[in-house]
Image (cartoon, grey):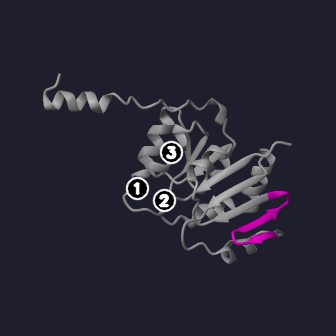
Amino acid sequence: MKPKKVFVTVGTTKFPKLIDKIVTEDVLRLFQSLGYNFIQIQTGKDFYPEAILPKLSSYNVKSESPLVIEYNDLVIRFEEYFEDFDGEITSSDIVISHAGAGSCLDVLRKKKPLLVVINEDLMDNHQIELAEELQKHGYLYYSTCDTLGEALQRDFTILKPYPEPDKSLFPNYLDKCVGFV
């Protein structure tokens, strides 16, 4: 069986609710039913496994540093940050991310299916505006932590590839501004 990998990233801002939701038995069983067998979670700072692991009925610790557990044949690796962030995206079958613009664009430019989870605890939540617009154009799906399970069951094969940037726009604009054209 070909491994199917999920990459979860919370970025540089704390988003413990997303990690808590991912590591629930309901969501882990859903991942398994969808054929996934490996979840790589970028936790950011202040991750406390002792706060979430007791919620699982059973798991085996495969490694302490970085923390790797196995839950019903599903391997889950927790790491604060990854040196090769782009490589993690590229090697994944789906990416679940916070809704920061940088992370969204990194994933979309690599043509990977993307589920963006809105951090509703942020003040002046501009993330939802970006997520709504990108979903409206068919590039990704978005959810909240509460609707994550439903969103994972959507058809990610119908998402459109994000268009390549037109690298001539800025130089052409600059040429016009300085009078070269």
The amino acid type of the residue labelled 1 equals Asn
Decide: marks 3, 1 in contact (CB < 8 A)?
no
Residue 160 point in image, percent of width and height: 56, 30
Q: What is the distance, in whole Å, between disc 3 and disc 1 at their CAs? A: 20 Å
Label 3 SS: helix
Q: In this figure, which residue is indicated by the disc labeled 1?
A: 125
Query: In this view, which residue lies farthest toward the left?
Result: 179
Please say whether residue 70 is one of the residues in the magenta stretch: yes
Q: Is residue 10 magenta?
A: no
Image location of residue 116, percent across then percent down: 55, 48
Relative to 23, say whether 129 is above or below.
above
The residue at the point 14 percent across, 32 percent down is 178
Rendered-image quadrant of the C terminus: top left
Mark 1 neighbour class, 10 Å CA radius: few under 14, some 14 to 19, many 20 or more: few
Q: Residues within 10 Å of mark 3 (few under 14, many from 20)?
A: some
Which label was assigned to residue 6? none
- Is 90 positioned to the left or the right of 72 in the image? left
- In the rendered image, the quadrant that contains the N terminus is top right
The overriding secondary structure of the stretch rendered in magenta is: strand
Amino acid at dot 3: Asp
Residue 166, percent from left and from top? 39, 28
Q: Residue at x 29, y 33 (%)?
A: 170
Say which residue label 3 marks: 106
State which tag comes first along the sequence, 3 or 1.
3
Question: Do the numbered discs 2 and 1 sit on residues whose CB atoms are within 8 Å?
Answer: yes
Mark 3 and mark 2 lie on one chain; the one further toward the N terminus is 3
Q: Quadrant of residue 90?
A: top right
